[in-house]
Image (cartoon, helix red, strand yellow):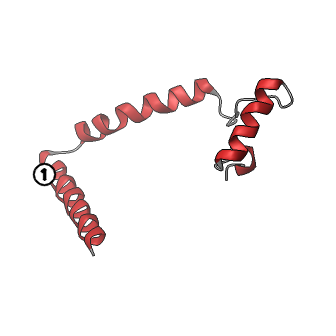
Amino acid sequence: MPDRSRKRPRDPNQLAKLIVDIATGQVEDTPEDDGKDPAAVALGRKGGLKGGKARAAKMTAEQRSESARRAAATRWQAQRDRKD
């Protein structure tokens, strides 16, 4: 779970004070480090981009059609649930 105490305040007055404190040097503005290695993130993204195409290439036309039918049914169900 992310450490929410490091986020900037949502209250406009508190945010303004923080900005002034940063500008005057009373508080140091440090960027959040999410602890992820940028190289690993790039590799994960790369794999995610080709995953769907590779999966579709291995499926037969009938399997792709069934998968698309189930996906559409799930989207329609979610849309009906939102209207209720």
Image position of 80 (left or right of 23): left
- Which residue is at a point 76% across and 25% down the rendered structure image? 23
Residue 44 or 22: which is nearer the viewer?
22
Image position of 84 (left or right of 37): left
Q: Quadrant of the C terminus?
A: bottom left
Above or below: residue 71 compared with residue 52? below
Q: Residues within 10 Å of mark 1 (few under 14, many from 20)?
A: few
Q: Can you give x and y, in whole percent of width and height, for residue 83 in the image?
A: 26, 70
Amino acid residing under circle 1: Glu
Q: Mark 1 sits on what residue? A: 62
Q: Can you give x and y, in whole percent of width and height, for residue 72 in the image?
A: 19, 58
Quarter of the rendering containing residue 50: top left
Q: Element at badge 1? A: helix
Above or below: residue 7 compared with residue 26? below
Q: Can you give x and y, in whole percent of width and height, for residue 27 in the image?
A: 83, 31
Count of numbered labels shown in the rendering: 1
Above or below: residue 16 compared with residue 81? above
Above or below: residue 74 compared with residue 29? below
- Residue furthest to the right in view is 26
Image position of 58 (left or right of 10): left
Quarter of the rendering containing residue 22: top right
Residue 33 or 84: which is nearer the viewer?
84
- Which residue is at a point 65% across and 29% down the rendered structure image? 37
- Which residue is at a point 70% across and 50% down the rendered structure image? 4
- Which residue is at a point 16% across and 58% down the rendered structure image? 69
Q: Can you give x and y, in whole percent of width and height, for residue 2 in the image?
A: 67, 49
